[in-house]
Amino acid sequence: METSQSIGTYLIQRLHAYGVRHVFGVPGDYVLGFFQQLVESPLQVINTCDEQGAGFAADAYARVHGLGVVCITYCVGGLKVANTTAQAFAEKSPVVVISGAPGTNERVKNPLLHHKVRDFDTQLKVFEQLTIASTVLHDPETAFREIDRVLAAALRYKRPVYIEIPRDMVSAPGLALHRPPEMQDVSDPDALSEAIREAGDMINRAKQPVIIAGIELHRFGLQDALLQLIEKTNIPVASLLLSKSVIAERHPRYLGVYEGALGYEDVRAYVEASDCLILLGAIMNDMDLGMYTANINLGRSIYATSERTSIRYHIYEGILLQDFLQRLSVANITPRETGPIPHPVMPAAFSPVPGQKVTVQRVFQRLNAFLDDTTVVIAEPGDALFGSADLFIHGHTEFLSPAYYTSMGFAVPACIGAQLANPQRRPLVIVGDGGFQMTGMELSTAVRFHLNPIVVVLNNYGYGTERPLLDGPFNDILPWQFSRIPEILGSGKGFSVETEEQLDAALQAARAYTDSFCILDIHLAPHDISPALQRMTNMLGKRVK
Amino acid sequence: METSQSIGTYLIQRLHAYGVRHVFGVPGDYVLGFFQQLVESPLQVINTCDEQGAGFAADAYARVHGLGVVCITYCVGGLKVANTTAQAFAEKSPVVVISGAPGTNERVKNPLLHHKVRDFDTQLKVFEQLTIASTVLHDPETAFREIDRVLAAALRYKRPVYIEIPRDMVSAPGLALHRPPEMQDVSDPDALSEAIREAGDMINRAKQPVIIAGIELHRFGLQDALLQLIEKTNIPVASLLLSKSVIAERHPRYLGVYEGALGYEDVRAYVEASDCLILLGAIMNDMDLGMYTANINLGRSIYATSERTSIRYHIYEGILLQDFLQRLSVANITPRETGPIPHPVMPAAFSPVPGQKVTVQRVFQRLNAFLDDTTVVIAEPGDALFGSADLFIHGHTEFLSPAYYTSMGFAVPACIGAQLANPQRRPLVIVGDGGFQMTGMELSTAVRFHLNPIVVVLNNYGYGTERPLLDGPFNDILPWQFSRIPEILGSGKGFSVETEEQLDAALQAARAYTDSFCILDIHLAPHDISPALQRMTNMLGKRVK
């Protein structure tokens, strides 16, 4: 005879079965019981300085590892991760938000318990806006099934979900004899066959087919399937800014990042001259489309995503992205000649000019020479991101940035999630001084859990991305002595960098020092920006006022 | 002939008319145009390190000044203040949340613009849960009226409101010849007269009437009306934890903080022995009611709030709190004898014991001797708050703490709002090391705007309030060298305190140094807690598991 396990331990067991090994969060009295269960489980609790940091770390963990978890207390914790959850929603990152809550036995007569905002379901209603599925585990008879349903939605749609556990339900037993369902979404075989036949014909008839590989290929783990398709057909492939590193950039058929008028002209021209664009898992947003300077003609496109598949202007329903990609890679498609195509320039060795002050452009040239197979680059929105578009990323899924939702404060906490998700990759964080001041002290968490990111602060004394749009005193911030942060945290190494030689020496020292984090405070002129940002702001400036 | 002003400048003009002089926020591209208008206005922009800090600062500003404003960009900024807005809602603090947004002209065909979560109204739907009124200013014909309506709701209900401005509406002209309405809520005169007559009779018949003065007396600026009532009738008055400092604590009729079994026994006994409790503007929540150990019998209570008025078990509708209090203070109530009552003990002079390590209890004794008429105390939830319950506060509205919602991370950013709202009061911030690690680096903002708070960090190496409830590694945090933060910020003075003599010397030095902030890192034993917290956790511990 089988005894039933508790609701909390079932949730932990399911997360573990889906590969989760770390849970990011901050404890609080409504969630302490569940934290205790976590400590007694195979999952490691990573408690961050602030819940915001935990939310971003869980998002990065999900991007690298396939599923991330942030666990916080009711309202005062949960509402602090509203923004990080919104980012995970917008950019399809499967994050499970687990919130403690007042016990069902405490809610009788609707008392004013601490942390309550308006009603007991206020937080639930907020997260219904920000997640793809949500539940409150208030009933032992349905709790296990609800956990199954909500976690399945996170994995099916690669979006965040919300699970609230009233504290008296954590140790309550669920239904005995429950078995998690075998979930196997399948494509409609007839629709799939017709779509593949039509797509194959269209590709074969095309003179210059081009693949645009989108972020969903990361999310669904389809990078190898993409490689297989490219290697069988020799069709050239571009990434978007959000999906950069979906394919190793040294691959001979890789064109570069396509971002309309904001990217390299040869990539734009090649992509837009295509008579058959194969868009795979791409989210068509303004940032990826170069603020809508991209010129993509759906009338000559095959456009497959996890949500729908279309060819030119007609739509196929019931086709899974992974099935479409897999079937396409074994379809009857004639291989192309491997003629010359645009291709990112391999980074040159960097020779510091003696006595020369550093510029944004030279920082990225030096970083490009620094990258290798053991680095994961994490770029904060702003010039850290725009400048990073031109970095030559070695492996796949080794570039992380919220390039569409573009929430500042992401990069430093994200490195915690990224390195725990894949300890083989040392994070290189590129962040502005403005972004660092939001969440950079989460380096404290990196120290506590023995991580060793290298943090490059592009210090231009304010919000450099906004200055070209519309400048004012609100774009200035207090200068911090970033290189002295190791003195606060009792760990790490700091470097103050003003010249190319100092930059070169600091990065060499950072590579050699692996015991803890390194932080490089790169002093830049306030109006020095990357060429990519210059193009971007010329366009955006027209729309601000 | 009159020309019409722009929607943005009308909003600014109305805020100014309501006394607002500072706006807290972080700029972003969807809100830059409005920031530009702010810079050109009489309002000063206070840009914080992170939006969370701006939200807490605006909340504190509202508590001191009557109305606060936080201004942020769409979603990536707005959703970061979900939690601070929720706190303002729960504790009745009138904060105006102003968010930039994509232009109405950009929303055609529902494109994926950056910062968008799910739909263009996702952020609005979130804030509908967290505010008392909300609007999107998408129509010049209704914009001025909508601004009037929403600001009036903030002032009427003392709750946060939400105003979203699509960026193409900022400079758009509203209706010419618009005049803000004269708002004058009035009480139902018959209901008011009957309620006052009944209340007066009940008070006159009572042997031991007691007033419990709640947070709404702060919010509606009724401290003087309360004083008048007390001085006319000699009825003793207790505060609650959330409303502490509603009356100067040296007032001879002040009993102390009533918090059920968690507070002082003589206060509890006196209050609960009353045969006529006069509850004025009190929110009856679990924290204020000593985790429901309070024993308040509604059958012998007069209970007036901004939302309703009741006497024993019947309710009067349509009575404003300010009218009720004002009419009660001139009603025919027989003055009481001024016999002896419980009363807070005046703080004694502090004599440091040579070589003695500091304890939580001794820290609060020393702080009590430090307070004077120029101090505003800001206490972070946790032992900073519980220990502060016994501080002897000199003036009224000189104690700020989110004693009901209890969001951590409040205290440091709050001191920015509090000092700007009343430059005559130097903030004394009492915060744990855990709370400081969330938002403490907002001291950067204090430096930038030439403020000089004294920050006392109760450093017990983790979440000390949770340890007695349920301990585990999740309650430990990395030790920071808090006293060295001035080195990062290039300003301020730091003190590391381990003994009573060091504490004494540091506070004297802090009082003498007024150029910038001071931070005291008070090293405490990890399990050292205040007597009040000990009582609290004995009760809470039973409910956690």
Image: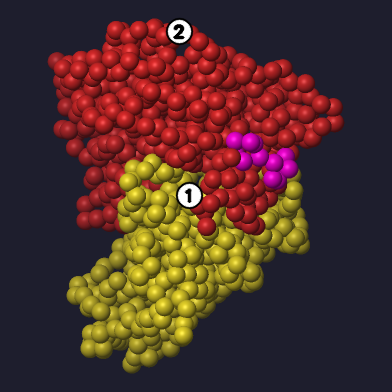
Chain colours: A red, B yellow
Rate crowding at label 2 as few (under 14), some (14 to 19) or many (20 or more) other CA atoms within 10 Å.
Answer: few
Q: For residue A107, which numbered disc appears in the image?
A: none
Q: Position of residue B233 (x, y in %)?
A: 41, 86
Identified by mark 2, the residue type is Glu
> Which residue lies at the image location 39% right of the left edge and 17% below the top edge?
A207
Left or right, residue B363 beside residue A356? left
Q: Position of residue A428 (x, y in %)?
A: 60, 26
Residue furthest bottom in the image: B332
Was residue A533 drawn as part of the magenta stretch in this picture? yes
| Residue located beneath label 1 in the image | B77
| Residue located beneath label 2 in the image | A337
Query: Where, quadrant-wise, is the C terminus of chain B in this rendering?
Result: top left
Rate crowding at label 1 as few (under 14), some (14 to 19) or many (20 or more) other CA atoms within 10 Å.
Answer: many
Instruction: Specify the quadrant of the image occupied by residue B314.
Output: bottom left
Identified by mark 1, the residue type is Gly
Magenta stretch: give its range: A524-534
Left or right, residue B387 beside residue B193? right
Q: Position of residue B334 (x, y in %)?
A: 36, 90
> Which residue lies at the image location 47% right of the left edge and 70% below the top edge?
B6
Classified by dominant secondary structure, the portion drawn in magenta counts as loop
Mark closer to the observer (2, 1): 2
Examine the rendered structure and indicate whether residue A185 appears above or below residue B219.
Answer: above
Give the chain letter at badge 2. A
Say if residue A307 shows up in the picture: yes
Was residue B498 drawn as part of the magenta stretch in this picture? no
- Residue in front for this viewpoint, A332 or A446: A332
Q: Position of residue A339 (x, y in %)?
A: 50, 10
- Residue in front for this viewpoint, A137 or B240: A137
